[in-house]
Image: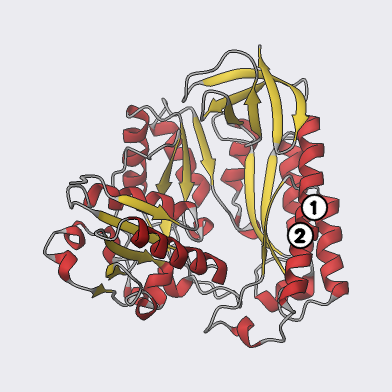
Amino acid sequence: MTTRPEILTFGCRLNTWESEVMRDHAQGLGNVIIVNTCAVTGEAERQARQAIRRAHRQNPDARIVVTGCAAQIHPENWTSLPGVTRVLGNEEKLKAESWSPAALAEPVAVSDIMAARETAAHLVTEFAGRTRAFVQVQQGCDHRCTFCIIPFGRGPSRSVPVGAVVEQVRALVQAGYREVVLTGVDMTSWGADLPGKPVLGQLCRRVLRLVPELERLRLSSVDPVEIDEDIWQLLEAEPRFMPYLHLSLQAGSDLILKRMKRRHLVADAASVVARARSLRPDIGIGADIIAGFPTEDEALFEQTRAFLADMALPYLHVFPYSEREGTPAARMRAVPVPQRKARAASLRAVGAASAARYYASLLGQPQRVLMETPTTGHSEQFAPVRLTGAEATVGDILSLLPVAVEEGGLVAERI
């Protein structure tokens, strides 16, 4: 019998972390496949359904447990799929008691996520097949962007206390991890529900001070207008705080941003990029972008395309807009799907050109690279790097000299 469950994870880095929590809870349950779904787009749900059908064909005797945001929001959509024996909500999936043999006999366990008020810390010291580790510091979201269904899958914003985060990071370092990524749903809201209302940068300072053996600390996606002064100071002066920002940007048009009910305008985003580059000229900056949001005409799309070209962000995650039932945007005038896809492709081309120029700017500058395979890894700025010559040990941090740019990253040699 299989003692380690097979886990299929879709979506965000937080889901990656939660899959490892479930892996620990589900040890020894036999032939079980866990599908951790995402609800950000219809495509993410389609891929999860395909994966379930494929898993059932390949392993018809396996019990399939479906969880994650898509399962939380519409559990009834998953119970009838072939091989699915249990659907778990986002709160239930992280509880050890949900993974007892007796509990697996219950077909559906999904509670009201909007009633959640706390986020329990879970000690995870192993990330299958990974050299960097993720730590959840925040869960849920109190904002209501018009396109987003995730608050209804994750519930209200709630923070993991500093002590629990430090304990998790310390355990990961002791387990051999040299880089830790802090993650959450709306991470810059961390601390608002804790005594004294600390901010995310203060948490980062505490982690770096209390775990001096940690070599690299990185943040996942942050809201541009909620980057606090401590984060800026760390970017400027702390070498263990990675020179990398990934912005939840979504558009480069003020009108579209307002219709999205975002909390920033184009000028705010431009100011953040300029400040980051003034502090760390080599900083790697990424952004999430939605193409073809409802009401976006050619002129509004061109505003986003021109803004992204001007900002020259090397790491763009571009998604065609996807209707989510129950959100205000789903009731707005839609852009035809072929136009959404064409606009997304256009923005990805802008991102690819910006990435190539950014990689070229790093040529000849020594880089500290965390090796994730014997020949590939990422620099501190999260630039993908391919090592030529003798292979490296996975998990090592090497000083490498970039000598060429190739599609998707840098080619480097040992110094």
Q: Amino acid at mark 1?
A: Ala
Q: Are marks 1 and 2 in contact (CB under 8 Å)?
A: yes
Closer to the camera in the image, 211 or 21: 21
Q: Position of residue 330 (x, y in %)?
A: 61, 83
Q: Quadrant of residue 66?
A: bottom left
> The residue tagged with tag 1: helix, strand or loop?
helix
**Picture residue at 63% right of the left edge, 81% below the top:** 329
Q: Is 360 placed left or right of 43 in the picture?
A: right
Q: Amino acid at mark 2?
A: Ala
Identify the residue at horizontal 56%, vertical 35% (top origin): 241
The vertical placement of 282 against 189, above or below, is: above
Question: Residue 64's spot in the image, x, y percent?
Answer: 29, 62
Identify the residue under disc 1: 349
Residue 158 visible in the snapshot: no
Q: Which residue in the protein does label 2 denote?
A: 345
Q: Is residue 229 visible?
A: yes
**Horizontally, is 399 left or right of 72 in the view?**
right
Residues packed near mark 2 inside 10 Å, few (<14), some (14 to 19) or many (20 plus): some
Q: Horizontal and vertical percent for residue 239? A: 58, 28
